[in-house]
Image (cartoon, rainbow, N blue to C red):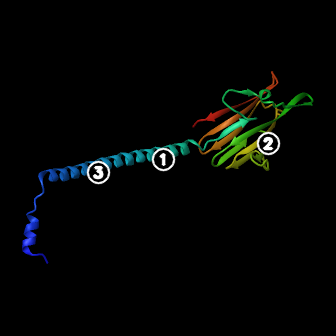
């Protein structure tokens, strides 16, 4: 296709040294930019990977730490320190029956749950309603739920019982609400105690 003379003439063309240096330096600069770009992309990718790992770890931790049970009476969270029912605006009814008077208390306990939770009382009766709709779900002494409920725990001290217990067992923790009547002071208190194995 090409004559040998043309090919030889083409191969003997010499570029000036200045042009050769410009071309080689521009190639080197291009490779340096490419390396910097690659390094920049690697830093960006490693930063994104680290953020993803942190997000996943936080999500797992948040899911493990959630799922407990929270209990409140009239919007007040209970603790191990006893709270008088009068402080919660709950006034037990006084009945007179010879030879002595007795009280009946209706304690509204709100239980927020995540997962299967069993609730039972040692004495008294629970009237359990859906926390969102108010629909009565159950009346009795033992109930299992997977959603938030409002419990009207009705107890009386006719049998001269001074302490009543509500056991709440969930997959995360178990605890007991203790409702006590002090006959000397005529006061009711309630507190929460965590059950440890």
Q: Nearer the viewer, mark 3 or mark 2?
A: 3
Answer with mark 3 or mark 1, whichever residue precedes in sequence. 3
Q: Nearer the viewer, mark 3 or mark 1?
A: 3
Residue 20 shows in this picture? yes
The answer to whether residue 103 is above or below residue 111 is above
Q: Secondary structure at mark 1?
A: helix
Number of residues whose C-alpha sits closer than 10 Å to that of mark 1, classed few (under 14), some (14–19) or many (20 or more): few
Residue 111, x across and y down, in percent: 70, 41
The image's mark for residue 34 is 3
Residue 153, x across and y down, in percent: 78, 39
The answer to whether residue 129 is above or below residue 77 is below
Q: CA distance from mark 2 to mark 1?
A: 44 Å
Number of residues whose C-alpha sits closer than 10 Å to that of mark 3, classed few (under 14), some (14–19) or many (20 or more): few
Rendered residue at 71%/27% (across/down): 82
Residue identifier under label 2? 125
Q: Quadrant of residue 180?
A: top right
Q: Classify residue 18 as left or right of residue 90.
A: left
The quadrant of the image that shows the N terminus is bottom left
Rendered residue at 81%/21% (across/down): 185
Instruction: Name the foreground residue: 132 vs 183.
Output: 132
Q: CA distance from mark 3 to mark 1?
A: 33 Å
Q: Quadrant of residue 10?
A: bottom left
Residue 152, x across and y down, in percent: 79, 41
The image's mark for residue 56 is 1
Instruction: Name the foreground residue: 116 vs 164.
Output: 116
Rendered residue at 38%/46% (across/down): 44
């Amino acid at each position: 296709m090409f004559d040998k003379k043309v090919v030889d003439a083409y191969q003997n063309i010499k570029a000036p040294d200045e042009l050769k240096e410009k071309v080689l330096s521009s190639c080197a600069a291009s490779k340096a930019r490419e390396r910097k770009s690659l390094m920049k992309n690697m830093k960006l990718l490693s930063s994104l990977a680290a953020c993803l790992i942190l997000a996943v770890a936080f999500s797992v931790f948040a899911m493990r730490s959630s799922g407990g049970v929270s209990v409140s009476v009239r919007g007040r969270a209970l603790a191990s320190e006893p709270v008088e029912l009068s402080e919660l605006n709950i006034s037990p009814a006084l009945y007179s029956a010879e030879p002595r008077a007795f009280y009946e208390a209706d304690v509204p306990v709100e239980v927020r749950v995540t997962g299967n939770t069993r609730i039972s009382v040692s004495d008294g009766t629970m009237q359990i309603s859906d926390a969102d709709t108010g629909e009565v779900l159950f009346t009795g002494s033992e109930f299992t739920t997977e959603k938030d409920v409002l419990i009207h725990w009705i107890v009386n001290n006719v049998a001269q019982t001074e302490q009543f217990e509500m056991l709440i067992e969930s997959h995360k923790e178990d605890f007991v609400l203790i409702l006590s009547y002090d006959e000397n002071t005529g006061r009711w208190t309630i507190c929460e105690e965590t059950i440890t194995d």
